[in-house]
Image (cartoon, helix red, strand yellow):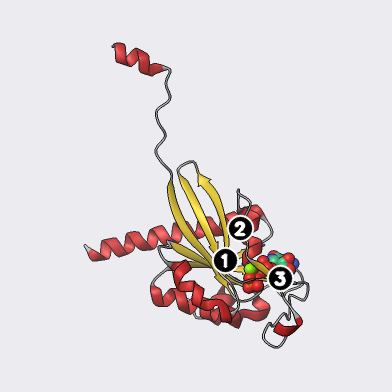
Amino acid sequence: MVFGRLDRGRKRPAAAPVALKILVAGGFGVGKTTLVGAVSEIQPLRTEELLTEAGRPVDDIDGVEGKHTTTVAMDFGRITLREDLVLYLFGTPGQQRFWFLWDELAQGALGAVVLADTRRLADCFAAVDYFERRGIAFTLAVNCFDGAERHPEEAVRDALDLDPHVPVVMCDARDRESAKDVLVSVVEHALASSAARRTAAV
Ligand SMILES: Nc1nc2c(ncn2[C@@H]2O[C@H](COP(=O)(O)OP(=O)(O)OP(=O)(O)O)[C@@H](O)[C@H]2O)c(=O)[nH]1
Ligand SMILES: [Mg+2]
């Protein structure tokens, strides 16, 4: 009884939140850094460098002419989706010459977002391929740039030859709620995939 009375006013210690690692990948200039920055509740860590004249022959900025910097290592951000669920976000560099960093970044990742720009859909092939080969669950998120033609989900799915279970969502990488919806989709899909794998293994 005594213990009960003493305990009454005291808060139960909250369970430590589950922390999940999510990658944000996709082609050059598709909005990865923008998405991590839009949802992160901490000041995101960025590793941006200026695009220069020297890079002009290899840095294809068609469609993102306003772009002046590029990620050379990674973006890092954090978002608490629920009191007991925290996501650590790792944005990958988009340019091919930095892809050697992807294997490091992918270690321990629960799932990934592959961002796509429908004006340059082929740029996300490599990311789709990367996660398919490694069995890392991903959501394909189309970043709907202003002025870009809108395509139905089925057309994007067909063009990328995605497995039917891969979620395809439309988003605006600049918008916090929209970016958050993408992350919710990844977490749900990744958890469902790992549950299905566990069942298959029994
Ligand atoms: N209109 C529009 N512009 C966007 C959107 N997302 C990003 N941008 C702009 O597009 C450019 C590219 O954004 P970033 O977030 O740097 O792209 P990234 O994928 O991180 O690029 P890399 O790291 O260089 O591969 C920036 O100039 C953004 O302001 C969007 O949803 N709509
Ligand atoms: Mg970037």
Where disc 1 sits, the SS reads loop
- Where residue 75 appears, x then y in whole percent? 59, 62
Mark sitting on residue 69: 3
Pick whichever of labels 3 and 1 is earlier in the sequence: 3
At x 68%, y 79%, the residue is 119
**Is 1 or 172 nearer to us in this picture?**
1
Label 3 packing within 10 angstroms: few (<14), some (14-19), many (20+):
few
Of labels 2 and 3, earlier in sequence is 2
Residue 117 placed where, x, y %?
Answer: 65, 74
Q: Are marks 1 and 2 in contact (CB under 8 Å)?
A: yes
Q: Which quarter of the rendering shows the C terminus?
A: bottom left
Q: Residue at x 73, y 74 (%)?
A: 148
Please give left or right for residue 43 compared with residue 25 in the image. Answer: right
Distance CA(mark 1)–CA(mark 2): 8 Å
Looking at the image, tell me whether mark 1 or mark 2 is earlier in sequence order: 2
- Amino acid type at circle 1 is Met
Residue lying farthest to the left in this orientation: 202
Name the mark on residue 74.
1
Asked whether residue 190 is in view, the answer is: yes
Ligand 1 within 8 Å of disc 3? The answer is yes
Q: Does 111 sit above or below residue 156? A: above
Residue at left offset 46%, top offset 77%: 130
Residue linked to disc 2: 45
Q: Quadrant of ligand 2?
A: bottom right
